[in-house]
Image: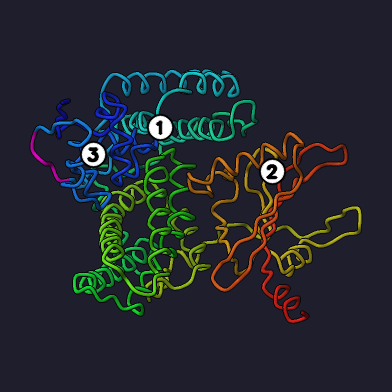
Amino acid sequence: MVTIELAESLYDLAGQYPALADILTAVGFRYIQNKRMLNTLGRILTISGGALVCGIDVVAVIAALHQHGFEISGKMQAYAPPAQGDTAAQALQGAEVEKSVKLFKAFLSRLHSGEAPELVQADFADSFADVEDSILYAAEREIIRDDTPISDVKIISELQVALYSSNAQGSGQDVAPLAAVAPEPPAPQVPYSEKMSAAAELIEIEGHPLQTFTKENEALAIIIKAVQKQVQRGKVLFELTKKLSDIALHYSKKGDLLYPLLRENYGILGPSEVMWTNDDEIRVELRALLSVSSYSEEELARMEALLKRVQDMIYQETNILFPICAVNFTQSEWCGIYQDAKDYDICFGVVPREWQKGESYYLHHKAPMGDIRIGGGSFTVEQLSAVLNTLPVEITFVDNADINRYFNEGHKIFKRPKMALGRSVFSCHPPRLEKAVAQVLSDFRSGKRDVVTQWSRQGDKTIRVRYLAVRGSHGEYLGTLELVEDMEEAKHFFCDEK
C-alpha cells in the first residue's frame, strides 16, 4: 500500500504518482488531466478541497483510492478560496518566480537601452517557452508589488501576450511585433492590498458595470437557494430551473468584456485560463440538465453539484475577479465595458442603470469624412459604414497578424465588443476553442484551405458561420473574414416548398 498525505497538493501528488490522475478522473476530478488547470488550481487544492470544488463525495474518492492500493494519511481540509486575489503568487513563491522577475527586469533594461523590440521579443519567447503560465503570472504580481512603473508593466504584458499567442498558433507563425518603447511617466495605481475596497467603491457607483455584475450575482444567489430547496425535496419545477439559463448570458459578458481585457492589456492569465474554462463546463452541464423532463435521483445529485459550482463561481467573482479588475482597469476601459454591455440582453431581471460617466464617453473618434475609392466605385465614409451595417450578416475581419480590425455594428447573435478591436483574435475565445481557431488561421495562411463552414443552433435560430481567407491580388494572405448568418428564413422557405 502507498500512503498519500491529504495535506499535499494535487499537483505534487500527480507528479509523484502518475496513476493517480486516471483514478481521480474516473471519480469526477475534471481538472487533473488538464495541464494548465493542474499547474494553477492543482497547486492550491488538496484531494478533499478538489472534491469540494468538483462537487464529489470525498468518501467515494477515498474508497476509490483504497481500491487501487492507496492508503490515506492526515486530516481532511476543506477548500475555501482565499480572500487575497494573488493566489498564484502566494502559492508559487520560490526560485522559479524570483528567476522570472530577474529576467523580466533584464528584458526591460534591454528595451530601454534601445535594442530592437523584435530581438528582445524573440529572446523572451526562448527564455519562457517552457515556463508555466502560473509562474509568469506570479512573477508579474511581484513586479507590480515592487512599484514598477505602469508603463513597464504594460511592456511585460505585451511580451507575455506575444508569447501566449505564439504558443497558441504553433511554431513558425507570425505574431504582432512589439511597439517601440516610449518614455511614459508612471501612472497612479491602486495597491493590490486595497483591491477589495476598490471593488466595493465601484460597486456603489450607480450604473457602473461592477454594480450590474454584482446585482446579477445577488439575483442568481436567490434563484440558487430556491432551486436547492426543490432539489432537497426531490421535486424540481421547470419554471424555476429555467431561470438559471441566464447564467450563460452572465458568463458570456464576463468572457467577452472582462477576461480578454485582463489577459491582453495586463497579462493576467489566471481568470481566463481557470474561470473561463469553469464557465464553459457549467454552461454545458446546465444545458444538459435543463433539457431533462423529469429528474431522477442521479440527475438531482448532478443539479445539486452544479449549484455548488455556481455558488463557488459567485464567490470567485466577488473575491478574486472583480477586485483584480478594480485595481487594473482604467476609467476609459470601464466606460468601454459599459458601452459594450448595452448589446447584451437583460440578465436575471437586472436592468442596468445609467452611468453618467459611461454615457458621456465615446470609445472611438468620429470617422473622418471623404471619399473611399475602390475598384468598383467610391463611397463616403458614412455611406460605406451604413452599407456594411445594412447587410443581413455579422461581419468580422481579422488581419494577417491575427488582430481584430473590424466588426460591423448592430444587434448580433455572437457579441463583438468594440473593446476587442486592436486585440488578438485569440482573446475573444475561451481556452477550449483556441487550438481550433489557431488551426483555421494556420491553414488559411499556408493556403491549405480558403473556406471553413460551421452550422449551429442558437435558441430557435439556425446559424451558418463561414470563415473566408482574404487574399491580395498576388494571392498573399491579408486576413480572415468571418460571416455569421441567420438561415432560419431559408430553412423555412425550402421546407415549405416541399
Label annotation for residue 399: 2
Viewer-nearest of discs 1 and 2: 1
Q: Quadrant of the C terminus?
A: bottom right
Q: Secondary structure at mark 3?
A: loop
Viewer-nearest of discs 3 and 2: 3
* Label 2 environment density (alpha carbons within 10 Å; few <14, some 14–19, many ≥20): some
User: Magenta region's main secondary structure?
Assistant: loop
- Whichever of labels 3 and 2 marks the residue nearer the N terminus, that label is 3
* Label 3 environment density (alpha carbons within 10 Å; few <14, some 14–19, many ≥20): many
Verify CB contact (< 8 Å) between mark 3 and mark 2: no
Left or right: 277 in relation to 423? left
Left or right: 202 in relation to 448? left
What amino acid does circle 2 point to? Answer: Asp
Verify CB contact (< 8 Å) between mark 1 and mark 2: no
Indicate yes or no whether the magenta region holds residue 70: no
Nearer the observer, 439 or 110: 439
| Cα–Cα span, label 3 and label 2 | 41 Å
Q: Residue at x 74, y 34 (%)?
A: 446
Q: Residue at x 30, y 50 (%)?
A: 323
Label annotation for residue 133: 1
What amino acid does circle 1 point to? Answer: Asp
